């Protein structure tokens, strides 16, 4: 099946996808802020530049998009048909990098939580999980 967008339209769409301040990340930040938690954002000195950092607790939170980080849900299993070899390598590299970053954080004494985009639909459950992690 061919792409429904022209290469220029696809390039424009892809250029608008950001790695920071995404809608899922902003949702998690708002939930935690309302609950009274304070955090740092994207700490450069830590491996992987975690989305939210709680230095006094030595805990970090990554908010991952299902497609980009290879989640096992229906959104993460989608694979583009055009340029399939590139996308397979790209997405597999993301998963491998995520594993490496989490192991580096663990070795440095940090605990990491990954929140998946598809899990954020139920905000009550999400906040419960975040609070449990931060205790």
Image (tube, rainbow, N blue to C red):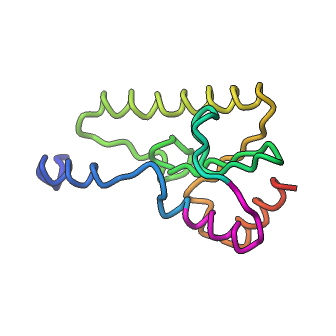
Question: Quarter of the image holding residue 117?
Answer: bottom right
Up-down relation of residue 13 to residue 86 (above or below): below
Is 24 above or below relative to 81? Answer: below
In the image: residue 2, left or right of residue 127: left
Q: Is residue 124 above or below residue 102?
A: below
Residue 109 within the magenta-colored segment of the rendering: no
Residue 32 drawn in magenta: yes
Residue 107 x %, y %: 77, 25
Where on the picture, by quarter, is residue 43? top right
Place of residue 16 in the rendered image (x, y in percent of width and height, measured from the top left): 30, 55
Task: Name the outermost residue toward the right.
Answer: 135
Q: Is residue 74 left or right of residue 35?
A: left
Judge left or right: residue 101 versus residue 69.
Answer: right
Task: Count the numbered circles shown.
Answer: 0
Q: Nearer the viewer, residue 53 or 89?
A: 53
Q: Residue at x 73, y 68 (%)?
A: 125
Residue at the spot 16% in from the left edge and 55% down from the top edge: 4
Residue 116, how many percent across, how many down? 60, 53
Residue 34 image position (x, y, % from top left) = 71, 74
Please tell me which residue lies in front, 11 or 56.
56
What main secondary structure does the magenta stretch of the protein show?
Answer: helix
Residue 135 located left or right of residue 9? right
Numbered range of the magenta stretch: 26-39
Identified at 69% across, 48% down, the residue is 53
């Amino acid at each position: 099946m061919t792409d429904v967008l022209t290469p220029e339209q696809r390039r424009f769409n892809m250029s608008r996808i950001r790695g920071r301040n995404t809608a899922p990340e902003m949702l998690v930040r708002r939930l935690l802020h309302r609950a009274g938690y304070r955090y740092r954002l994207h700490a450069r000195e830590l491996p992987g530049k975690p989305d939210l950092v709680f230095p006094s607790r030595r805990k970090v939170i990554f908010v991952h998009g299902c497609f980009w980080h290879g989640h096992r849900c229906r959104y993460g299993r989608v694979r583009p048909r055009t340029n399939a070899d590139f996308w397979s390598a790209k997405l597999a590299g993301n998963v491998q990098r995520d594993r490496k970053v989490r192991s580096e954080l663990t070795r440095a004494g940090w605990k990491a939580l990954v929140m998946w985009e598809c899990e954020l639909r139920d905000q009550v459950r999400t906040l419960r999980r975040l609070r449990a992690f931060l205790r």
